[in-house]
Amino acid sequence: MAAEGATSDATTPSRQHDDIDGVDMVLLSPADFERLDAARRQVRATTARLHELSHRLRRAEQLLDHIATTLAGSYDPAMLIGMTDVQRKSRRPVRS
């Protein structure tokens, strides 16, 4: 096992390479592995939050488009309550 690129910085893991069955492997101490694993969990959590925020942003854009359409005068109340065209055409007029 040959040490390559070892540093004295406490936050940088020492990099040790070894060839196992013809595959170059990086060997980590248990503490370095735990830090790497924690970083992976943080990345996965951040990715999940980004997907959720992306979904919420798309929904907000849809709602804003609906508001813009409503304010432009082409308001269709069936859009708000999710009625189909058939349901909307068959309903009775609203009395005020």
Image: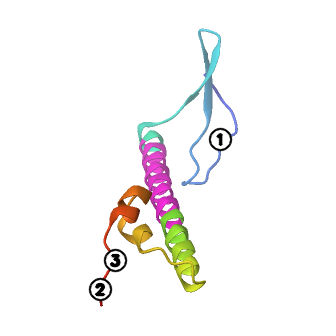
Range of the magenta residues?
A: 34-57
- Secondary structure at badge 1 equals loop
Residue indicated by mark 3: 93
Residue indicated by mark 2: 95
- Secondary structure at badge 2 equals loop
Do the numbered discs 3 and 2 sit on residues whose CB atoms are within 8 Å?
yes
Estimate how packed mark 1 is, as few (under 14), some (14 to 19) or many (20 or more) residues with alpha carbons within 10 Å. few
Residue indicated by mark 1: 6
The total number of labels drawn is 3
Instruction: Give 41 or 80, whichever is nearer the viewer.
Output: 80
Would residue 3 be found to the left or right of residue 41 on screen? right
State yes or no: residue 51 in magenta: yes
First of labels 2, 1 by sequence position: 1
Tag 3: residue type?
A: Pro
Percent x, y of residue 82: 38, 63
Separation (CA) of disc 3 from disc 2: 6 Å
Q: Quadrant of the C terminus?
A: bottom left
Tag 2: residue type?
A: Arg
For residue 69, the mark is: none
Nearest to viewer (mark 3 / mark 1): 3
At 46% from the left and 65% from the top, the residue drawn is 56
Separation (CA) of disc 3 from disc 1: 79 Å
Separation (CA) of disc 2 from disc 1: 81 Å
Q: Image height check: is 37 above or below 10?
A: above
Would residue 80 be found to the left or right of residue 96 on screen? right
Determine the residue located farthest toward the bottom in the rendered image: 96
Tag 1: residue type?
A: Ala
At 62% from the left and 50% from the top, the residue drawn is 8
